[in-house]
Image (cartoon, helix red, strand yellow):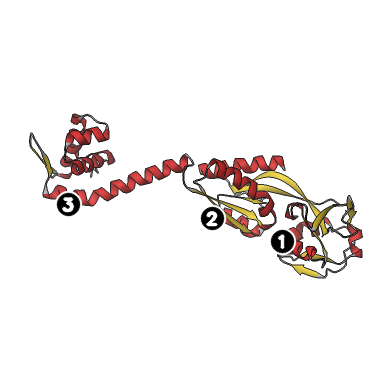
Amino acid sequence: MLKPSIADLRAFVTVGELQSFAAAAKALHLSQPALSRRVSHLEEMLGVRLFDRTTRSVGLTVLGRRFLGEVHGLVEDLDRSVLSLRDAAELEAGDVTIGCVFSAVHHFLPPVIRAFRDKHPRVLVRIIEEGADEVLASVKHGEADLAVNYIGMQDPELEFTPLLKEPYVLACPAGHPLAKRRSVRWEELAKYPHARVSHASRNRLIIDQALAELPPLPRPVIEVRHVSTLIGLVERGLALAVVPQLTLPLRPAAVVGVKLEKPAITRTLAIVRRSGRSLSPAAAAFGQLLKKAGRAT
């Protein structure tokens, strides 16, 4: 069974609204004969007369009025969808969802978001800030368009595009004896109470693997789930802590970071996205700004 084309339906709706073939042809940028052919084609396909035509006027038939009421909204919805899609393609509207691990979101994302909004102020930016595993899942399940994460390199379902290598540093109060040192060896931490993240954090796994060959540090005085909590504990002078560098407060601050060596430990922050999937224009634009920020960091 043949189905009406959108062009035929739009021609019918426009004539029905304007009650004039001449006015409808002008509105649709068509010649009157071309418009008449579209309406006649629709009538032939439906097997009904939609308009009563005279040399001076045109009016809807009873069935024409009924049909106009049924398809008018459909054509308007289609036009709105096309405009919405065009706006999204031209970054005049739409949204983008970015995942980011807690330990990088405050220092890494704000300048990128600012640059993105300066260029595309009408695009909504959604942020999913979670732990590494949750952020990875948000990308794999399609909740996030892309993410900043330090895990996922070995996952065949994902593309892992490195942004920067970030060192782990010793976070200590600004007035602490180690705060003015250029670097600190791991064994020196045994002299001071320290706090650490629990096994719920992927940062703990990276640190434990890197220190596997060293004598174990004394038992920590505090264990927490999130690196951001460690910063607060250090700021209050309760303990020292090993944290990713980007989690440190902006200077001047009550907490400073000191380089750790022998071994130096790093993690690779990367853009993570699903393999073989096209990004929306908004997500692609955001990804380019992330890459630029990574090169500048």
| In the image, residue 152 above or below residue 192 | above
Residue 44 place in picture, x, y as percent: 15, 40
Relative vertical location of residue 252 with respect to residue 52 in this rendering, above or below: below
Amino acid type for the residue under numbered disc 2: Glu
In the image, residue 83 sits, relative to residue 210, either above or below, namely: above
The three-letter code of the residue at mark 1 reads Ser
* Camera-side residue of 50 and 234: 234
Residue 106 visible from this viewpoint:
yes
Front disc: 2 or 3 = 3
Q: Residue at x 46, y 43 (%)?
A: 88
Q: Which residue is mark 3?
A: 66
Which label's residue is closer to the chain start, 3 or 1? 3
Q: What x and y, as percent, mark residue 237?
A: 82, 66
Mark 1, residue position: 228
Q: Which label's residue is closer to the chain start, 2 or 3?
A: 3
**Spatial CA span between label 3 and label 1:** 63 Å
Instruction: Give how far across and how far down residue 21 sits, in percent.
Output: 17, 35
Identify the residue position indicated by label 2 in the image.
143
Viewer-nearest of labels 3 and 1? 1
